[in-house]
Image: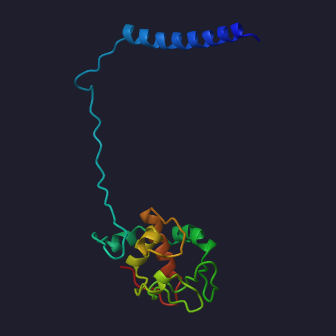
Amino acid sequence: MDSFEINKIVAAILMVALLIIGIGKLSDIIFHVEKPETPGYVVEVDQAVVKSIQVSSETTNEKIDIASLMALGDLTHGEKVFKKCAACHSIVKGGKNNIGPALYNVVGRQVGAVSDYKYSKALSAYGKEWTFEELNGYLIKPAKWIKGTKMAFAGLRKEKDRASVIKYLNQNSDNPLPLP
């Protein structure tokens, strides 16, 4: 193939591109549409108020209503969502530690209290109990709630999922705590 043939091919491609652009510009001129100043009808939408929860255990500016959050939870849904957790954690009584510690009796227990599990330094030094509020904050995004934790879980974004898992964890205990 000589250079003259290549020039014809390139010229044909350029002509097609220019023709397409030209037709678009010409149709905009021919079919010019002006938008009306006032719309024909107004769609009214209720604006949802979104609360932003800052997830930091040291500086929690906004308190969430844990009672209303826990009202969203459902035990059967919690059992289903907990399957994500079951890859690393055991929930049965007397269950062994896996990648993560056993979670039976976790609600109300001291953070980092399972004796035969090697916790990260951050969790060992945390010094709080796993309350409903602590579990909620931790399950949003563990790495942000307790900086330095070795738990590599993205978190549960949906409030119903978190509330359901917390209810499920509370239920799997010798003495479940009363719900707030």
Residue 145 drawn at (x, y percent): 41, 72
Q: What residue sits 40% from the left and 86% below the top? A: 128
Q: 58 or 66, which lies in front?
A: 58
Instruction: Report the front residue among 69 and 138.
Output: 138
Colour convention of the picture:
rainbow
The residue positioned 52% from the left and 11% from the top of the image is 18
| Residue located 48% across and 90% down the image | 175
* Figure quadrant of the N terminus: top right
Q: Eyeballing the image, is 34 above or below 47?
A: above
In x, y percent, where is residue 54? 34, 66
Most extreme residue toward the right, as rendered? 1
Q: Provide residue 152's location: percent of width, then percent of height.
A: 54, 69
Residue 153 lies left or right of residue 127; in this view the side is: right
x and y, in percent, of residue 30 in the image: 38, 7
User: Hey, which quadrant is residue 101 in on the image?
Assistant: bottom right
- Can you say which quadrant of the picture contains the C terminus? bottom left
Q: Which residue is outermost to the front?
A: 3
Return the residue nearer the eye: 67 or 62. Answer: 62
Count the marks. Answer: 0
Furthest toward the left, the residue is: 37
Foreground residue, 21 or 6? 6
